[in-house]
Image (tube, rainbow, N blue to C red):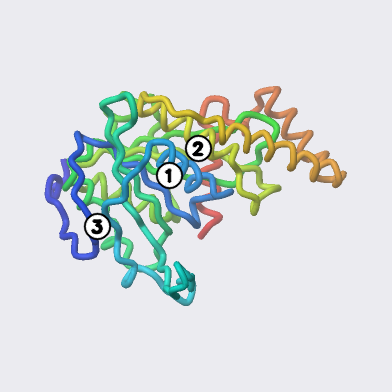
Amino acid sequence: MPDDAGRAPALEHVRWSSRPHLRAPVLLVAFEGWSDAGDAASTGLGYLGDQWDAEPFAEIDPEIFYDFSSTRPRVEFDAGEREIVWPANVFSAITVPGTSTDVVTLLGVEPQLRWRTFCDQIIGVARALDARLVVTLGALLAEVPHTRPVSVFGAGYDADIIDELDLLPSSYEGPTGITGVLHHACHSAGLRSASLWAAVPTYVPAAPSPKAALALVERASRLLDVSVPTTELEIAATSYERQVSELVVDDEETEDYVRQLEHRYDEGEEGLFDDGTSLVEEVERFLRDQD
């Protein structure tokens, strides 16, 4: 076990509003930005929080972690009062209804600065709450058809969690985002961690993808061995697929491309992630391309 395992980092940048009493929770994490193609990861985690009545209890002060000329705060009016809304990274506590499973969610925005200090804050909160597992949600652009089930790849960073949760080992080398740094920090702290990645079609990169969000919600709920109602996401996913199909049929070149992807998927050819292996390669390509 790493030398610094078990030590809780200083939490000088965490602002607590309350201290929840939880039983060995799982920490689910999603960041808007680089690892959130189609807003699938942030939408999925937000949906889980809404369905399970998540209660915010702490947040990370954004002051030293963001270049505010890149990630700009917003001006909003609340009850006629003008206020500045800063980039938020909010921790919320959940006891999944009808179970004894406790969950903490961290929904935020990938920072530009001081990633090691930022991850120390997350590790510190996880330690303070005796979290037993950290799971990040992400989404990537890949050569997949919007008309077929969404592929989700799960990777583990410790041998026991790989076997326990039926994940694939991570052997990625190359550029990384805040999630990669967080998993390294978890390993150094002796915290078990895993990641879930959903594939979003490359030909609709800017459109929010409730279909990918639904796939992440379903995979996360299986990992936690709990159930969650998904009717709202299912309706949104059906509408998404229909709207994208209407756009595709108007462009002959894109329609032909999608037809080829569907054929590859239906034939089970390499590249469509049937066994997870080729999705690993697609995740690695995506990470490298983001440098």
Q: Amino acid at mark 2?
A: Val
> Residue lying farthest front?
79
The answer for how far apart the CA atoms under marks 3 and 1 are is 25 Å
Q: Which residue is mark 1?
A: 172
Note whether 176 is above or below 79 in the view shown. above
| Displayed quadrant of residue 225 | top left
The dot on residue 280 is: 2
The residue carrying pointer 3 sits among few (fewer than 14), some (14 to 19) or many (20 or more) residues within 10 Å by Cα, namely many
The dot on residue 121 is: 3
Q: Nearer the viewer, mark 3 or mark 1?
A: 3
Note whether 117 is above or below 258 in the view shown. below
Camera-side residue: 49 or 274? 49
Q: Nearer the viewer, mark 3 or mark 2?
A: 3
The residue drawn where x is 74% and y is 42% is: 244
Q: Secondary structure at mark 3?
A: helix
Q: Is residue 174 left or right of residue 13?
A: right
Q: Secondary structure at mark 1?
A: loop
Q: Are marks 3 and 1 in contact (CB under 8 Å)?
A: no
**Residue 196 placement (x, y as % from top left):** 44, 38
Q: Are marks 1 and 2 in contact (CB under 8 Å)?
A: yes
Camera-side residue: 242 or 171? 242
Q: Amino acid at mark 3?
A: Gln
The residue drawn where x is 38% and y is 24% is: 166
| Displayed quadrant of residue 171 | top left
| Displayed quadrant of residue 9 | bottom left
Q: Amino acid at mark 1?
A: Tyr
